[in-house]
Image (spheres, rainbow, N blue to C red):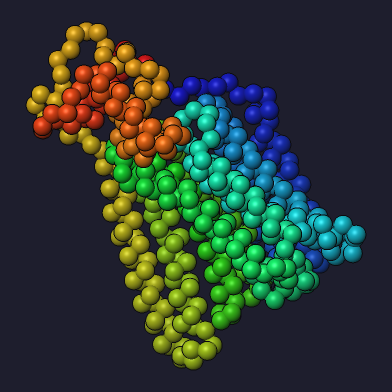
């Protein structure tokens, strides 16, 4: 059972502090907007979306900490701080550039890379929601170090030519990149790092069963927001050329996408950390992720179809885009429904005859070590070896060793027609029902 912590004074004040920071940053950017600085960083929709997402992360930090999920609560607090920093840096950069302040170069350099850390933090937050213990998994360390290196490389190698002067970030000609091959490698390394947690967690979810499968799948969906946001950013460049989306509109859309990804991952973290995830909740999360991916596919194909170089008439373009939209969105709608049903299936099949050994009133699981008890508890929840490893932050080889020791201590031999995992899980559940399981 998850321990419930009393919220600290700082934890209780965090939403108020975040609210004050978000209000101050938003007010500064909107004031610059009213003063005539109408670049995309001061776009009201993007500014308010980021401020609201930061507030949501602050509230999530308090709730997760109260539930005893300290690692996830800390990461939610860091995500809130990163989003607020991005807003404040935007205000500083716009003011410094427009007023020709000597600090403008530094402000723009920091602002131009401040959107990268939130992508890593929203992933780490969703992943931490299904972790047990204080250990940091190697996948988290890899994401942290790679994204930190990518952020530094972006700040050092890439500079905007004339920031906020009509060519915002999605316009390639508005950026100068020193040592361009290194910049490309840095971008590829960052995207690969953002795929690490989604791949790991989706594998763990699909190989698990029962309640563990649903929880891990929700966390996996939460980590998928970061690579989808990067794909959206790349798509915006495609939508401008060969498409005809204006740079300012595309860049403002990116701000909204970043805020939406952070809010979605925060919601997934709260849901996964809560424990029981119902079929309807799984469907909403999985369908939302699938439809977001479908939107990207439709927009990319539609942009290519409508590009001026294709030279199709208005009617053929409209028909083709309609067909693509129906096919892709319809496929995503149906496919996500099936995947959600698969992830929500509970394994309630009765144990085969003779699968449960007769035992006395003494609880056999009492002989397990605390770590073995954690492994068996996750197994009883339906987690696969990969799912247990993801939650307990150990390797699958270590889980294999723990399970072999558990089977020996519980006296479970490999027998024809009997599954030792099922028998061990039932013994754990029986002990828990009698109040004897650790």
- Say left or right for 125 vs 404: right
428 relative to 214, above or below = above
Q: Nearer the viewer, residue 69 or 16?
A: 69
Q: Is residue 74 something that shows in the picture?
A: yes
What is the residue that sits farthest to the top in this orientation?
361
- Say left or right for 116 vs 128: right
319 relative to 418, above or below = below
- Say left or right for 208 vs 34: left
Name which residue lies at 26% across and 42% down.
Answer: 345
Q: State which quarter of the image contains the C terminus.
A: top left
Place of residue 326 in the rendered image (x, y in percent of width and height, measured from the top left) = 35, 71
What is the residue that sits farthest to the left in this orientation?
353
Place of residue 70 in the rendered image (x, y in percent of width and height, measured from the top left) = 56, 29
Name which residue lies at 48% across and 73% down.
Answer: 300
Q: Is residue 381 something that shows in the picture?
A: no
Name which residue lies at 52% across and 53% down.
Answer: 194
Place of residue 222 in the rendered image (x, y in percent of width and height, measured from the top left) = 47, 48
Q: Nearer the viewer, residue 136 or 317?
A: 136
404 relative to 238, above or below = above
Name which residue lies at 37% across and 66% down.
Answer: 329
Q: State which quarter of the image contains the N terminus.
A: top left
Quarter of the image holding residue 419?
A: top left
Quarter of the image holding residue 399?
A: top left
What is the number of callouts on the image? Answer: 0
Place of residue 206 in the rendered image (x, y in percent of width and height, measured from the top left) = 32, 46
């Amino acid at each position: 059972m998850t321990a419930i912590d009393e919220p600290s004074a700082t934890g209780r004040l965090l939403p108020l502090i975040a609210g004050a920071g978000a209000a101050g940053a938003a007010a500064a950017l909107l004031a610059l907007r009213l003063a005539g600085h109408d670049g995309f960083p001061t776009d009201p929709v993007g500014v308010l979306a980021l401020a609201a997402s930061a507030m949501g992360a602050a509230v999530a930090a308090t709730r997760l900490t109260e539930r005893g999920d300290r690692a996830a609560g800390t990461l939610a607090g860091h995500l809130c701080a990163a989003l607020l920093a991005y807003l404040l840096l935007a205000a500083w950069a716009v003011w410094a550039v427009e007023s020709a302040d000597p600090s403008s170069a530094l402000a723009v350099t920091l602002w131009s890379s401040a959107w990268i850390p939130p992508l890593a933090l929203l992933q780490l937050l969703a992943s931490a929601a299904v972790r047990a213990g204080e250990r940091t998994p190697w996948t988290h360390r890899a994401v942290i170090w790679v994204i930190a290196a990518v952020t530094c490389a972006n700040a050092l190698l890439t500079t905007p030519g004339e920031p906020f002067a009509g060519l915002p970030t999605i316009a390639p000609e508005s950026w100068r990149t020193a040592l361009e091959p290194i910049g490309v490698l840095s971008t590829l390394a960052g995207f690969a790092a953002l795929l690490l947690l989604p791949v790991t967690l989706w594998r763990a979810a699909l190989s698990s069963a029962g309640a563990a499968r649903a929880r891990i799948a929700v966390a996996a969906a939460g980590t998928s927001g970061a690579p989808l946001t990067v794909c959206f950013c790349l798509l915006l460049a495609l939508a401008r050329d060969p498409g005809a989306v204006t740079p300012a509109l595309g860049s403002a859309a990116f701000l909204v996408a970043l805020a939406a990804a952070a809010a979605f991952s925060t919601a997934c973290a709260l849901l996964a950390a809560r424990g029981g995830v119902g079929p309807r909740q799984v469907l909403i999360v999985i369908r939302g992720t699938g439809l977001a991916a479908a939107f990207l596919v439709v927009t990319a194909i539609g942009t290519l179809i409508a590009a001026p170089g294709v030279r199709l008439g208005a009617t053929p373009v409209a028909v083709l885009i309609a067909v693509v939209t129906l096919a892709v969105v319809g496929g995503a709608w149906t496919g996500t429904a099936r995947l959600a049903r698969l992830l929500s299936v509970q394994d309630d099949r009765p144990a085969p005859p003779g699968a449960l050994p007769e035992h006395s009133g003494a609880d056999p699981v009492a002989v397990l070590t605390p770590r073995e008890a954690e492994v068996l508890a996750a197994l009883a929840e339906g987690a696969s070896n990969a799912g247990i490893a993801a939650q307990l932050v150990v390797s699958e080889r270590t889980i294999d060793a723990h399970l072999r020791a558990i089977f020996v201590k519980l006296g479970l031999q490999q027998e024809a027609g009997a599954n030792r995992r099922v028998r061990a899980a039932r013994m754990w559940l029986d002990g828990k029902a009698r109040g004897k399981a650790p």
